[in-house]
Amino acid sequence: MTATIFATFLESRHAREAQHKLQFLRVEHVDEGHDGISITAMVGEELMERAMHVIRQSGGTVEQ
């Protein structure tokens, strides 16, 4: 089962950092928002906790 995570960041470089890390974890469908400071990701249940940790570690706030 997959879920959508929406995350916002204070700076675009932090959003890009999280995007790259999520892709490294093999999270598919990671999209950068048009504003440059948000991302949306489709995450499998098995990676949910790790994905949220990566986002928070990169300075983001997670919304599900």
Image: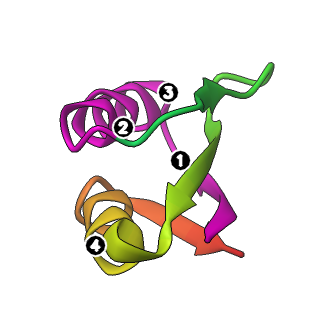
Q: Residue furthest right?
A: 34
The residue that disc 1 covers is 10
Circle 3/circle 2 CB separation < 8 Å: yes
How packed is label 4: few (under 14 Cα within 10 Å), some, or many (20 or more)?
some
The residue that disc 2 covers is 14
Amino acid carrying label 2: it is His
* Of the two numbered discs 4 and 2 in the rendering, the one whose residue sits closer to the viewer: 4
Q: Does residue 21 show up magenta in the picture? A: yes
Specify the segment rendered in magenta: 1-26
| Above-or-below relation of 1 to 17 | below
Q: Residue 27 sits in which quadrant?
A: top left
How packed is label 2: few (under 14 Cα within 10 Å), some, or many (20 or more)?
many
**Label 3: which secondary element:** helix
Q: Residue 16 sits in which quadrant?
A: top left
Q: CA distance from mark 4 to mark 1?
A: 17 Å
Mark on residue 12?
3
